[in-house]
Image: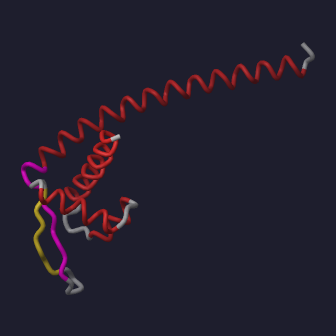
């Protein structure tokens, strides 16, 4: 049970690192919307990434004169993102192979069912 929780947390961290690397000025509200998770969860994850030393947050003023943050991946964050990328690539490749195999089995089942239905309707 703990392993699946850790994997889900790692996946959230990975997704956050990917987004922040490409959009360092994104707001937590935008992150929550894009990732389809709560604003509180985004805040919790960002704090965890800061605590781990994977990102740094610095204040800046945006065009609407509101205080906002700029998120930068640290060298450790860049390394963690690379490792997580490899880890999730391997996981997704295994999932892809399993789904591909399942699709082939389903196609065979449909083909067999269609053959059976044709024989049945022909009275064989």
Q: Nearer the viewer, residue 64 or 102?
A: 102
Q: Which range is magenta?
A: 67-77
Q: Residue at x 15, y 45 (%)?
A: 80
Give the residue at the far top of this rendering: 124
Q: Residue at x 21, y 61 (%)?
A: 46
- Residue 108: x %, y % from top left: 64, 21
Q: Would residue 56 be counted in the magenta stretch?
A: no
Q: Residue at x 33, y 34 (%)?
A: 91
- Residue 17: x %, y % from top left: 22, 53
Question: Does 87 appear above or below 58?
Answer: above
- Residue 90: x %, y % from top left: 30, 32
Quadrant for residue 85, please give it.
top left
* Most common SS among magenta residues: strand
Q: Residue at x 24, y 59 (%)?
A: 45
Q: Nearer the viewer, residue 13 or 113?
A: 13
User: From the viewer's perspective, is 5 left or right of 79?
Assistant: right
């Amino acid at each position: 049970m703990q392993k699946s929780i850790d994997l889900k947390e790692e996946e959230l961290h990975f997704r956050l690192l990917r987004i922040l690397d490409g959009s360092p000025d994104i707001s937590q509200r935008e992150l929550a919307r894009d990732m389809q998770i709560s604003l509180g969860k985004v805040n919790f994850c960002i704090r965890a990434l800061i605590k781990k030393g994977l990102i740094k947050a610095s204040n800046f003023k945006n065009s609407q004169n509101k205080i906002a943050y700029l998120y930068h991946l640290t060298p450790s964050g860049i390394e963690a993102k690379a490792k997580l990328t490899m880890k999730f690539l391997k996981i997704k490749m295994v999932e892809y192979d399993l789904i591909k195999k399942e699709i082939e089995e389903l196609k065979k089942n449909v083909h067999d069912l269609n053959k059976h239905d044709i024989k049945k309707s022909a009275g064989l």
